[in-house]
Structure formats: structure tokens, C-alpha cells
């Protein structure tokens, strides 16, 4: 088994945490374990991701929190390298975690090299310490129960339970892709609760292939034409403690901001319907004719406002010209005198 250089050098100097007097909360350590997400911050960015994962795994073992390598997700950033760890432990064990961490650091059982220079290791439950929502959305993996924030004008969540992919998904593709194309782009995430918690959907490789063909066939019927580079479909693995045969994934359908055209264009679905995205909700279906009438009325009102401004500016221009002529006549009279 591969060992990191730091791990091999300090193996003899880092015995397991010796038994100490019971903490005030040790009475609850035998409770039924539940799954939690730990945030570990201020990791040393000089180490690679595999090395940090191995060191962090050994550190958690010394804190009596054994965890498999696949449940450790390290995000390496120059300013803040951190990790998200999925653990199964009683609530009381997490409550005593700060006390055990402090005791281990005092007895030098935690590698100082694991922590960034001039920082202290941050270890907390949940993602409250992580304010980079865009980093979570861009990860290669997601943890079940992770919080992705709230829905916005450009982000829509769908739980996707049951027969969602075979029944409701095609209708949502039409609605949300069309609405995002007619606004500023956006992403539809399937496998996420409305409150932003990641759950994942059971999705095999065959389901992925069927979903890709379905999306491509629907968008080929859009007018004007939707080119392949206008959207991306990805399946993000979801790390879970469940032992289901079918893996859990989050489906992310991202519609990129349409390129600027000579004239504004409205996209319609393969069924001739038009949808708009306004303030985090979908408006439609609207017919193209109805939207064109609405646009005409809107521009007629705008044109009327512009005509009023032109009239006001014209009057102001005439007044300024009269004042300028009067000043010129006065200056000429002064020269004659």
C-alpha cells in the first residue's frame, strides 16, 4: 500500500491516541451512528490531493473517526485548501470532537505539516464554514446531504424521485432550457431537494445514454436552432453510505448564455411553445404571436416616452439658441461703443 513521505517518516512518532479520562459527553458514544458531513479547513496547499487525503484519513482515525478514502473529497485552493468528509458517527461523538482535537494537538499526535503555515486546523460539522457555493457546484463529486444554497433566477432544483427521468424530465427540459435561452442562461439540477440538499437519483450508465439521446432529440426541434455548444449535460457522482447497486448521481443540464445576435430572438420548443424565466419562476407556455404582440406594445410605450423626451429636448435647444443669440448681440454692441 502506498504511503506518503510525511506519513512514513512520522509513523513511529505518531502513536494512536492513548486512553484518557472520559469526556463529559462520552456516555452517548454508543448511540446509533448517523451520517454527517465534516468540513476540514486550512489544510496545507503544498501537498497534493492524494497525500492530503491519506494524512487526513490517519488524523481522523486518531480522533476515533475511521473513514474510508472514497469518502474524503479534498478541494485544493492556494488561499484555502479544505476537505469535505462523509462520516458515520453518533451525534455525541461529533459534539466531543473539538475536545479530542485539542487534546491530540497538545500531545503532538496531529501532524503539523497537515495544517497551512500560520493557520489552525478547522474541523466542524456541516458546510457553514464554506462560503464558496460555486466551488461546490463545480466539484467532480457531491456528498449526499450537502447544501447547495437556494434556487435563483439561474438555478433550478428538482428532486427527481421515482420515474422522473422517464416521465417528467422531458417536459422540464422543454420548459427550463427554453426559459434559460430566452433569459441569461442557467442550470437545471435533478437530484436536489427544493431546500438545496443533495439527495441524488439512481442513474446507471444506460440511463445516462438514454437521457443524453432524449435531451439531444428535444433540443434539435427548437427554433431557432440550438447548437451543441449552447448546453452541457453532466452526471455528478453522489457519495453516500447506502449500499444500493445503482449509483446515485446529480444530473446537471446547463444552458449557456446565448451569443448576442443582430436582432433579439425568442426560442420556442419543438412543440411551438415559448417560456420565459422571471425572478426564479417560469412564465408560459406562451405562443410566439402573443409574445410578439406583447413586444410591440412594450416598444410602442417606449417609443412614446422617447418622443416626449425629444420634444422636451427640442424646446430646450430652441431656448438655448435664443439665449446664445442675445449674448452675441450684446457683445457686438459693447464693441461699437
Image: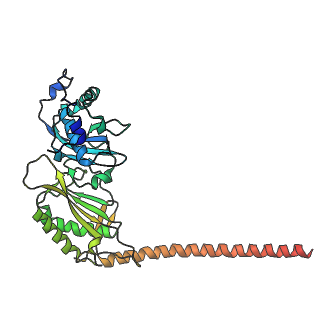
Residue at the spot 29% in from the left edge and 55% down from the top edge? 151
Q: Position of residue 49 (x, y in %)?
A: 25, 48
> Above or below — where is 27 with respect to 308?
above
Task: Identify the image quadrant of residue 138.
Answer: bottom left
- In percent of the image, x 39 and y 73: which residue is there? 260
Instruction: Judge by depth and name the residue closer to the eye, 9 or 257.
Output: 9
Residue 84 visible in the current orientation? no
Residue 66: where, in percent of width, then height? 15, 37
Looking at the rendering, in which quadrant would you find the C terminus? bottom right
Left or right relative to 183: residue 191: left
The quarter of the picture where the N terminus appears is top left
Residue 261 found in image quarter: bottom left
Can the viewer see residue 315?
Answer: yes
Counting from the top left corner in percent of width and height, residue 316 is at: 66, 72
The single residue placed furthest to the left in the displayed view is: 245
Residue located at (75% from left, 72% from top): 323
Q: Along the line of sight, which residue is nearer the eye, 21 or 271?
A: 21
Amino acid at each position: 500500500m502506498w504511503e506518503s513521505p510525511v506519513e512514513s517518516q512520522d509513523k513511529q512518532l505518531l502513536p494512536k491516541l492513548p486512553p484518557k479520562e472520559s469526556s463529559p459527553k462520552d456516555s452517548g458514544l454508543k448511540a446509533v451512528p448517523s451520517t454527517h458531513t465534516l468540513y476540514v479547513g486550512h489544510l496545507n496547499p503544498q501537498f497534493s490531493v492524494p497525500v492530503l487525503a491519506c494524512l487526513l484519513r490517519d488524523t481522523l482515525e486518531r480522533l476515533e473517526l475511521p473513514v474510508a478514502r472514497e469518502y474524503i473529497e479534498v478541494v485544493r485552493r492556494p488561499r484555502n485548501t479544505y476537505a469535505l468528509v462523509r462520516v458515520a458517527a453518533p451525534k455525541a461523538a461529533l459534539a466531543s470532537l473539538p475536545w479530542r482535537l485539542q487534546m491530540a494537538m497538545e500531545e503532538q499526535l496531529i501532524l503539523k505539516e497537515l495544517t497551512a503555515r500560520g493557520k489552525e486546523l478547522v474541523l466542524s460539522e456541516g458546510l457553514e464554514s464554506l462560503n464558496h457555493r460555486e466551488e461546490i457546484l463545480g466539484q467532480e463529486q457531491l456528498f449526499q446531504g450537502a447544501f447547495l444554497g437556494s434556487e435563483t433566477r439561474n438555478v433550478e432544483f428538482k428532486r427527481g424521485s421515482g420515474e422522473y427521468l422517464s416521465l417528467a424530465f422531458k417536459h422540464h427540459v422543454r420548459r427550463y432550457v427554453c426559459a434559460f435561452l430566452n433569459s441569461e442562461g442557467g442550470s437545471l439540477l435533478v437530484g436536489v431537494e427544493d431546500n438545496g440538499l443533495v439527495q441524488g437519483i439512481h442513474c446507471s450508465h444506460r440511463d445516462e445514454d438514454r437521457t443524453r439521446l432524449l435531451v439531444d432529440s428535444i433540443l434539435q426541434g427548437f427554433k431557432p436552432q440550438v447548437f451543441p455548444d449552447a448546453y452541457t449535460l453532466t452526471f455528478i457522482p453522489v457519495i453516500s453510505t447506502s449500499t444500493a447497486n445503482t449509483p446515485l448521481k446529480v444530473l446537471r443540464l446547463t444552458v449557456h448564455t446565448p451569443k448576442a445576435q443582430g436582432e433579439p430572438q425568442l426560442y420556442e420548443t419543438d412543440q411551438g411553445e415559448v417560456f420565459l424565466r422571471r425572478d426564479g419562476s417560469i412564465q408560459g407556455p406562451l405562443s410566439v404571436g402573443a409574445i410578439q404582440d406583447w413586444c410591440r406594445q412594450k416598444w410602442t410605450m417606449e417609443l412614446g416616452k422617447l418622443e416626449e423626451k425629444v420634444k422636451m429636448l427640442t424646446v430646450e435647444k430652441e431656448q438655448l439658441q435664443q439665449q446664445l443669440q442675445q449674448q452675441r448681440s450684446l457683445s457686438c454692441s459693447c464693441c461699437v461703443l
